[in-house]
Image (cartoon, rainbow, N blue to C red):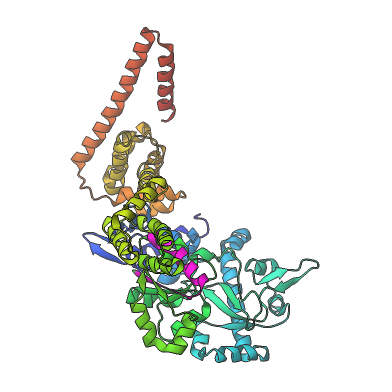
Amino acid sequence: MMSFIPEDKILEIKNRADIVDVVSEFVQVKGVGRNFIGLCPFHSEKTPSFTVSSEKQIFYCFGCGTGGNVFSFLMKIEGLSFPEAVRRLARRYGVQIPTVSLSSEQKRRLNEREELFSINRTAMEFFHHTLLHDKAGRKALDYLRDRQISDQAIQDFRLGFAPEGWDNLARYFFQKRLSPSLVEKTGLIVPRKNSSGYYDRFRNRIMFPILNLNMQVIGFGGRVMDDGTPKYLNSPESPIYNKSRSLYGLHLARQPCRNTGTVYIVEGYFDLLRLHQFGVENSVATLGTALTEEHVRLLKGYAQRVILVFDSDAAGLRAARRSIDIFMKQEMEAQVLVLPSGHDPDSFLLQHGLEQFKESSEKALGIIPFLIESAVKDHGLSVEGKIRITNDIIQPIMAIRDSVARSLYIKMLSERIGVNESAIMEKARQVTAQSRGKTFGSLRETDRQTIFQPGGQKQPGEIRFERHIVAMMLQFPEMIQEVEERNLLNYFTDATLKTIGQMIITHQQKSVSEIIDLMEDKRLQSISAGLAMGEEVWNREGCIKLMDQFEKSRKRQEDDLLEKIKQAESSKDDVLLLKLLKQKQVEVTSR
Ligand SMILES: [Zn+2]
């Protein structure tokens, strides 16, 4: 993990980088005492437990137990490898990294992603050039102008055209002597089935390059200009393209989302271009996939409120309903803007303009009111209809964690369909009884415990001491030598804590943040960050006392065991004896 980039460079980058700065790009944090806190980007929460220490250059979430240093943060939030995270920060802080010492195999692996990005960029420029400057692109340019897409938008989004014919792009790449098998990984070319060679995946389509937050081209969407099918074709997933993590336009929308606190989510590429062209820059589009939890988690870093703008057709409504669960789970405020029948955001803005669009956004319904209204529309208010409506709505209402909000929505439903509130409550109780055990929320406590208690099954009491000692080593490094001299780690029963303790001893001169880099296991990183983040006040005396107590308690346990073994021997209880000896064996081997 360390071999690709010289260690002194990693240190240099780390010294220049500030974790608070880097985290702030994704999470809104504010200073509280010595730390900065904000809403965790890795789990859903309403009260901030995500903590960043500028002094220690680490982060830790007291809610879900995720933690680490600036590199672990970037790796986790952007799905990067360690070298990628290091390189990202190197670029940002202007640190030059020499690459000469790499073996060709190391270089190949390290550079593959970079090369895929570069191939995509080449393709983007090829498509863009074809659209603007090639005869082949003429009809596409006419088509875009016909749809009132401005030249500025064509530039901003680097739109392009994949010409007709089977291998224009493939030939272009081969002229550039790029390895076909590498280009194939981007999904831009596809091997021919019955003969050798490759053909272009995108032909005769308007091309929409998809960029990530670092302005790297991760994939493409291609749209036909006539009634051909499929209407949209997207790049397949690749080492650099993960659909469930990517949103079209986020690279341009990030800052506007921050400024407004709101993000519009639309479905289509043209919808997005239109919003952008009308100055609604805080908008993103899903890429032919349903909205995922990862999308929502990503957006939470930039906005507090989501407005889903879906087509009024049945498919649009279905899509809206599907995404609702996700917002509920992520506890993010969402509203649904349903446009008048026959409209998508593109056509609506063209026909009615920005003012009316904004007016409609103001009236966008919250999730539950939206569900109620669309159920009323679907089922009508007959007796049968009311029963169906209640069945449709009760589950989403019961999924709301806030009990006050829950009862307010029950009241709303009751008033809207004219059914007694207590009858709805009764129904709710039935539903909850049926689905008990399946609800989310119950999971979180166990998750939290496994993270907070390394080793899992052990009683917290037994390892409390061990956690305390490791925390001491991290927060009050003066004591590391003493721990080493007393051989305290030998008494540890928890393997994870023991490993962390050993690493701290081996790398006494290093800071917590540096030691975290040496841990390949993310779980170790999180636990270490958590233990280092504590706000205990340490002094020498207290530490000595802690270590004495720990030793005493371990020795007492050992004595107890020996005593029990003696008793078992004298009472000839062979079963017990065997069990105790085994226990002793475990203690001995674990040293
Ligand atoms: Zn968290």
Residue 9 can be seen, yes or no? no
Residue 217 can be seen, yes or no? yes
- Give the answer, above or below, for where 412 lies relative to 467: below
In the image, residue 307 lies in the stretch drawn in magenta: yes
> Quadrant location of the C terminus?
top left
The x and y percentages for residue 99 are 54, 65
In the image, residue 93 lies in the stretch drawn in magenta: no
Bounds of the magenta segment: 305-330
Nearer to the camera, 214 or 206: 206
- Please name the residue shown 45% across and 62% down the image: 294
- The image quadrant that residue 101 belongs to is bottom right
Q: Image quadrant of ligand 1?
A: bottom left
The x and y percentages for residue 517 are 42, 54
Left or right position of 263 against 128: left
- Please name the residue shown 58% across and 76% down the image: 121
- Give the answer, above or below, for where 349 lies relative to 523: below
Left or right position of 359 against 269: left
The x and y percentages for residue 313 are 51, 74
Nearer to the camera, 176 or 97: 176
- Which secondary structure class fits the magenta region best? helix
The x and y percentages for residue 57 are 33, 59
Left or right position of 155 against 301: right
Nearer to the camera, 88 or 122: 122
- Give the answer, above or below, for where 504 lies relative to 465: below
Q: Residue furthest right?
A: 195
Instruction: Give the total of numbered labels.
Output: 0
